[in-house]
Amino acid sequence: MNDQYHYTQTDLARALKKIGVCNGDVVFSHSNLGFLGIPQGGNTRENVFNTVWGAFREALGSEGTLCVPTFTYSFCKNQPFDPDHTPSTVGMFTEMIRTLPGAVRSCDPIFSVAAIGSKAHVLLDDVSNECFGPGSFWERLLENDGSVCNVGIGAHSAFAHFVENTLKVPYRYKKLFHGQLVIKGKQYKHAVLYFCHDIHDPRTVLETRRFENLARSKGFVHAEMVGRGEVNRIKCTDIVEICKQGLKENKWFLVNGPREGEAEDLCAPSQMDIFDTRLDRNASMMEIIGKLWTLPRDIISDGYDAALYAIASQLEFITTKNNANPQMIIHKYPTGTEAYTWIVPEKWTCREARLETLDGKTLFSSRDNPLHCLSYSLPFQGEVSRDVLFQRLHTHPRIPDAIPYKFKYYERDWGLCCSESLKQTLTDQTYRVMIDTEFRYGNLKVAEFILPGESPDSIVLCAHLCHPRMAQDDLTGVAVGVELMRRLAALPKRHYTYRFLIVPETIGSLCWLSSNENLHPLIKGGLFLEMLGLDNPAALQMSFQGDSQIDKCFWYAVREKEPDAWRAPFRKVICNDERQFNAPGIRIPMLSLSRVFKPDSGKWPYPQYHTDQDTPETVSRKKLEDSVDLALTMLHYLEQNRILINKFKGEVFCSRYAMHIDYDSDHESHAALFGALDFIDGSHTVADISERLNVTFSAILRIADLLEQKGLIEKELSITE
């Protein structure tokens, strides 16, 4: 070395070969070239690049492949990603490799990689949308016997995140990022899964020293000094082995981890105690709604948890008249949990969101109404033009004075909501937006109240508890479900076991279904309860199957109990979590009971839907009670639905058994008796016969009881399919 430079291309090429880089190899390289000092020829950008690239080219030969990170984090920053033009954000060398003729770049909008060499296309073409998952560059690097060869820094690399993903470390989780992918000038909507960590939790921040020490002590890191720094190489297979060993001994092997005596729970601290959710024992349905409706019950939030535990305490008060022991379970599903194709998002907290004039006047704030903030809005603070504000300011299309409920659980964006009337007063050219929100690792919670019956065969009742500051949607369903459990528990006996699920909409049911597949064969059907305090006739939405025994029993009960009720096929009344139970691969017949307007009414589902006008004032106490009575009748019919098996042959001589029903005084029962006798052959249920004869379920049930008393038939429990 002389006073002019610290290393030459020959020095670097010789060191690369000495640490094991050979002709035809595949290497991935992080670099900090300044740590090597000044190369021969000067410290210009072009000379530094040519020196290092020339050394790699010499060591790898014509058949080798060099891969470098060209990370941009574009979708994390809500920016489009163009693999041909979006520059690398991780160093001059990586950007210059990306722009070399013949270089290939992956279409990963967060962790793209550029490569040049014989295997560049094999490694980078059509990578999966999981940044560190199957089908990613990192998996291909391992499969192609690749190595990490760093210049100027230690041996740690982003490849470790692939290992963390493979080994499912507990401090990282899958998170969905949406954005625009630009290919040859054309934009496409794209989504990727990033195995990330809670950026607010210092325990999950990368810590490389343990990895470096173990890898070097085992002789896996081959290193040589070049100039003032080091080049090193470690095989990807050895990285996997080191991480496996380290994580087996210490789950915090690759991150900071907790300080001594600090709790290891990764969930963000709860602040649900700030909400007043105190309810008297056996609170009425209206008391439950009145106490909980104002809470900010976003799908994973302290407000939702506060409401859930308040409801759970009501269910825990329930006792039965027999020896059955009800069970209350709070299921927890951590952020990143995969529920079939869905992914549990992060916990979201809105401290405040407000719109101000430039002179500091607050125009509206989420502290006055949580609906002013788009649920799961990104944080944002700054001055914006009126045009930009209006792109993210949501209003109701039909009700000028209503604040709408809007959400973007998986699409990362910021937004505010207000009434159209207020929006029309916003005439300034510039406004100040302040959205103080936080995304943290958390637990999605589902409450399951189990009321045992004579059989483990189960009927599921379900309602969702999410939606901030709303009453009909769906606190009314939750309140009716609580009261149903109380009434069912008071019965002297029940054939079925009843499971009442309180969920965050969609994702809650999917979590429960995917984690309880062993129960699927036992679940004979279900009923989703929603919007049951509206002053409208009952509306029954049928299951996907549409003609199952539970469909028939429930409809006959609704038709008899409320003659003005209406029904429609699956997805034709109002869509909610019954979709998940009826979905392909599950096909549990779940119906939906609501009191919404008909779709062609011009009021569907109801005028205050998803607005701040959905308040307890819209809830009819009588309709809540009617809904409980109706649901009990539906379940009673299901419990009584039996296959009727004949113990007779031929036409029954009714006079012999003193069975006489006068045609003129009781036409329905007369028709039921003589019509039913034709169908009692061991292949028809009460519901089947009711359908065939077009007479009420209760009429056929009375005839069945009479025939059973006379010893002419026996009843066998009906299948519900």
Image: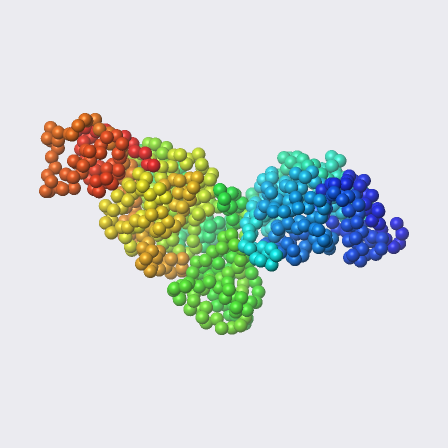
Q: Quadrant of the C terminus?
A: top left
Query: In this rendering, would 474 be left or right of 262?
Result: left
Among the 4 quarters of the image, the one containing residue 438 = bottom right
Query: In this rendering, would 381 be left or right of 691?
Result: right
Residue at horizontal 80 percent and vertical 41 percent from the top: 17
Q: What is the x, y in percent for residue 588?
A: 38, 40
Looking at the image, which residue sits at the far right? Answer: 2
Q: State the colouring used for the structure image.
A: rainbow
Residue at horizontal 34 percent and vertical 32 percent from the top: 455
In this view of the protein, can residue 262 be seen by the observer? no
The answer to which of 564 and 274 lies nearer the viewer is 564
Among the 4 quarters of the image, the one containing residue 251 = top right
Query: In this rendering, would 215 be left or right of 695?
Result: right
The answer to which of 381 and 669 lies nearer the viewer is 669
Residue at horizontal 51 percent and vertical 73 percent from the top: 428
Q: What is the x, y in percent for residue 313?
A: 40, 44
* Residue 700 higher or lower than 628, as above or below: above
Q: What is the x, y in percent for residue 155?
A: 73, 43
Query: In this rendering, would 432 be left or right of 672?
Result: right
The answer to which of 678 and 245 lies nearer the viewer is 678
Residue at horizontal 77 percent and vertical 40 percent from the top: 22
In this view of the protein, can residue 141 be seen by the observer? yes
* Residue 689 higher or lower than 203, as above or below: above
Q: What is the x, y in percent for residue 48?
A: 79, 54
Number of marks drawn: 0
